[in-house]
Amino acid sequence: MNKFAILLALAVAAPAFADATQQKPTQKKPAQKKPVLQKSGGFELFAGEDKQFYACLRAANRQVILLSEGYSDKGGAQKGIEAIKTASCEKSHFKISRAVTQKGTPARWYFVLKAENHETVGVSELYNSRQGAEKGVASVMANGCGSKGSAAQQGAAQQNQASQTDQANQANQQGE
Protein backbone atom coordinates (compact mmCIF):
# COMPACT_ATOMS: atom_id res chain seq x y z
CA MET A 1 0.00 0.00 0.00
CA ASN A 2 1.62 3.28 -1.01
CA LYS A 3 1.68 6.43 1.13
CA PHE A 4 -1.13 8.08 -0.82
CA ALA A 5 -3.43 5.07 -0.37
CA ILE A 6 -2.63 4.97 3.35
CA LEU A 7 -3.42 8.65 3.83
CA LEU A 8 -6.58 8.28 1.74
CA ALA A 9 -7.72 5.34 3.89
CA LEU A 10 -7.13 7.40 7.02
CA ALA A 11 -9.11 10.29 5.58
CA VAL A 12 -12.06 8.04 4.68
CA ALA A 13 -12.15 5.99 7.88
CA ALA A 14 -11.36 8.63 10.49
CA PRO A 15 -14.63 10.64 10.19
CA ALA A 16 -16.71 7.45 10.30
CA PHE A 17 -14.83 6.25 13.34
CA ALA A 18 -15.28 9.58 15.12
CA ASP A 19 -19.04 9.44 14.41
CA ALA A 20 -19.28 5.83 15.64
CA THR A 21 -17.50 6.54 18.91
CA GLN A 22 -19.38 9.76 19.69
CA GLN A 23 -22.90 8.41 19.30
CA LYS A 24 -25.10 9.10 22.28
CA PRO A 25 -26.63 6.05 23.99
CA THR A 26 -30.22 5.35 23.06
CA GLN A 27 -32.85 3.14 24.61
CA LYS A 28 -32.64 -0.40 23.34
CA LYS A 29 -35.60 -1.79 21.46
CA PRO A 30 -36.10 -5.56 21.26
CA ALA A 31 -36.00 -5.67 17.44
CA GLN A 32 -32.99 -3.34 17.18
CA LYS A 33 -29.81 -4.67 15.53
CA LYS A 34 -26.60 -4.90 17.55
CA PRO A 35 -24.35 -1.83 17.20
CA VAL A 36 -21.58 -2.07 14.62
CA LEU A 37 -18.94 -1.06 17.15
CA GLN A 38 -17.52 -4.09 18.97
CA LYS A 39 -14.71 -4.16 21.50
CA SER A 40 -12.07 -6.86 21.72
CA GLY A 41 -9.61 -5.86 24.44
CA GLY A 42 -7.92 -2.71 23.13
CA PHE A 43 -9.30 -3.42 19.66
CA GLU A 44 -12.55 -2.11 18.20
CA LEU A 45 -14.33 -2.91 14.95
CA PHE A 46 -16.41 -0.33 13.10
CA ALA A 47 -17.96 0.29 9.71
CA GLY A 48 -16.72 3.29 7.72
CA GLU A 49 -18.76 5.57 5.51
CA ASP A 50 -17.34 3.60 2.58
CA LYS A 51 -19.13 0.45 3.87
CA GLN A 52 -15.76 -1.15 4.71
CA PHE A 53 -15.01 -2.65 8.14
CA TYR A 54 -12.01 -1.33 10.04
CA ALA A 55 -10.24 -2.29 13.23
CA CYS A 56 -8.50 0.17 15.49
CA LEU A 57 -6.27 -0.32 18.48
CA ARG A 58 -6.72 2.00 21.43
CA ALA A 59 -4.21 2.74 24.16
CA ALA A 60 -5.16 2.61 27.84
CA ASN A 61 -6.09 6.32 27.64
CA ARG A 62 -8.58 5.41 24.85
CA GLN A 63 -6.64 7.23 22.11
CA VAL A 64 -6.58 5.49 18.73
CA ILE A 65 -2.99 4.40 18.10
CA LEU A 66 -3.43 2.17 15.02
CA LEU A 67 -6.01 1.83 12.26
CA SER A 68 -6.31 -1.21 9.99
CA GLU A 69 -6.96 -1.24 6.29
CA GLY A 70 -10.59 -1.56 5.17
CA TYR A 71 -12.18 -5.02 4.86
CA SER A 72 -15.34 -5.99 2.99
CA ASP A 73 -16.72 -7.97 5.95
CA LYS A 74 -16.39 -8.25 9.74
CA GLY A 75 -14.62 -11.60 9.47
CA GLY A 76 -11.85 -10.00 7.44
CA ALA A 77 -11.48 -7.20 9.99
CA GLN A 78 -11.32 -9.77 12.82
CA LYS A 79 -8.54 -11.60 10.95
CA GLY A 80 -6.86 -8.20 10.58
CA ILE A 81 -6.91 -7.86 14.38
CA GLU A 82 -5.16 -11.22 14.70
CA ALA A 83 -2.57 -10.11 12.15
CA ILE A 84 -1.97 -6.91 14.17
CA LYS A 85 -1.64 -8.91 17.40
CA THR A 86 0.99 -11.11 15.78
CA ALA A 87 2.93 -8.44 13.88
CA SER A 88 3.01 -5.92 16.74
CA CYS A 89 5.28 -8.24 18.76
CA GLU A 90 8.27 -7.50 16.49
CA LYS A 91 9.77 -4.01 16.27
CA SER A 92 11.13 -4.89 12.82
CA HIS A 93 7.53 -4.97 11.50
CA PHE A 94 7.16 -1.21 12.06
CA LYS A 95 8.36 1.46 9.64
CA ILE A 96 8.36 5.11 10.68
CA SER A 97 8.04 7.60 7.80
CA ARG A 98 7.71 11.30 7.25
CA ALA A 99 4.33 12.29 5.86
CA VAL A 100 4.08 14.37 2.72
CA THR A 101 3.10 17.90 3.77
CA GLN A 102 2.53 21.17 1.98
CA LYS A 103 5.47 23.50 1.65
CA GLY A 104 5.81 25.67 4.73
CA THR A 105 3.91 23.31 7.05
CA PRO A 106 5.66 21.46 9.86
CA ALA A 107 6.81 17.91 9.26
CA ARG A 108 4.49 15.15 10.44
CA TRP A 109 5.39 11.53 11.13
CA TYR A 110 3.49 8.23 11.08
CA PHE A 111 4.27 4.53 11.14
CA VAL A 112 3.08 1.49 9.24
CA LEU A 113 2.79 -2.01 10.72
CA LYS A 114 3.47 -4.84 8.28
CA ALA A 115 2.77 -8.56 8.64
CA GLU A 116 5.32 -11.33 7.93
CA ASN A 117 4.17 -11.33 4.28
CA HIS A 118 5.02 -7.58 4.09
CA GLU A 119 1.35 -6.60 3.72
CA THR A 120 0.29 -3.46 5.61
CA VAL A 121 -1.97 -4.38 8.52
CA GLY A 122 -2.14 -1.01 10.27
CA VAL A 123 -1.29 2.68 10.03
CA SER A 124 -0.82 5.15 12.86
CA GLU A 125 -2.17 8.62 13.39
CA LEU A 126 0.06 11.56 12.46
CA TYR A 127 2.63 12.72 15.01
CA ASN A 128 4.38 16.08 15.31
CA SER A 129 7.80 14.46 15.77
CA ARG A 130 9.68 11.27 15.04
CA GLN A 131 9.98 10.74 18.80
CA GLY A 132 6.19 10.88 19.06
CA ALA A 133 5.91 8.21 16.36
CA GLU A 134 8.48 6.08 18.21
CA LYS A 135 6.38 6.34 21.38
CA GLY A 136 3.36 5.33 19.29
CA VAL A 137 5.21 2.20 18.13
CA ALA A 138 6.01 1.34 21.76
CA SER A 139 2.35 1.82 22.68
CA VAL A 140 1.16 -0.46 19.86
CA MET A 141 3.68 -3.09 20.94
CA ALA A 142 2.49 -2.80 24.57
CA ASN A 143 -1.23 -2.80 23.77
CA GLY A 144 -1.34 -5.05 20.69
CA CYS A 145 1.29 -7.71 21.26
CA GLY A 146 0.38 -10.30 23.85
CA SER A 147 -3.29 -9.38 23.77
CA LYS A 148 -5.22 -12.27 25.26
CA GLY A 149 -6.00 -14.84 22.64
CA SER A 150 -3.54 -13.75 19.96
CA ALA A 151 -2.43 -16.46 17.56
CA ALA A 152 1.24 -15.78 18.31
CA GLN A 153 0.70 -16.03 22.04
CA GLN A 154 -1.27 -19.27 21.75
CA GLY A 155 1.37 -20.78 19.46
CA ALA A 156 4.20 -19.78 21.81
CA ALA A 157 2.32 -21.20 24.80
CA GLN A 158 1.74 -24.50 22.96
CA GLN A 159 5.41 -24.74 21.96
CA ASN A 160 6.52 -23.95 25.52
CA GLN A 161 4.16 -26.58 26.94
CA ALA A 162 5.36 -29.19 24.41
CA SER A 163 8.99 -28.36 25.23
CA GLN A 164 8.36 -28.75 28.97
CA THR A 165 6.61 -32.07 28.38
CA ASP A 166 9.57 -33.31 26.28
CA GLN A 167 12.04 -32.24 28.97
CA ALA A 168 10.01 -33.99 31.68
CA ASN A 169 9.85 -37.20 29.59
CA GLN A 170 13.61 -37.10 28.99
CA ALA A 171 14.27 -36.59 32.70
CA ASN A 172 11.99 -39.55 33.55
CA GLN A 173 13.75 -41.79 31.00
CA GLN A 174 17.19 -40.87 32.36
CA GLY A 175 16.05 -41.59 35.91
CA GLU A 176 14.78 -45.09 35.02
Image (cartoon, grey):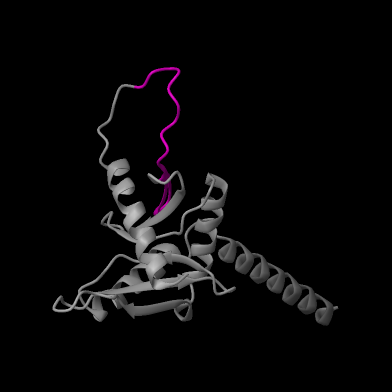
Q: Say whether residue 98 is magenta.
A: no
Identify the residue at horizontal 52%, vertical 57% (top origin): 80
Instruction: Note whether 9 is above or below 46 in the view shown.
Output: below
114, 168: nearer the viewer: 114
Please give left or right for residue 84 compared with residue 159 in the image. Answer: left
Q: Dividing the image into 4 quarters, which one contains the C terminus?
A: bottom right
Please give left or right for residue 32 compared with residue 176 in the image. Answer: left
Identify the image quadrant of residue 160: bottom right
Q: Is residue 16 visible?
A: yes
Residue 138: give x, y in percent of width and height.
Answer: 35, 73
Residue 51: give x, y in percent of width and height.
Answer: 45, 43
Q: Is residue 66 visible?
A: no
For the magenta stretch, what is the residue range? 28-47
- The kind of secondary structure the magenta stretch mainly shows is loop
109, 161: nearer the viewer: 109
Identify the residue at horizontal 39%, vertical 59% (top origin): 9
Return the residue found at the far top: 30
108, 79: nearer the viewer: 108
Identify the residue at horizontal 59%, vertical 61% (top origin): 151
Instruction: Note whether 78 is above or below 89 in the view shown.
Output: above
Q: Say whether residue 39 is magenta.
A: yes
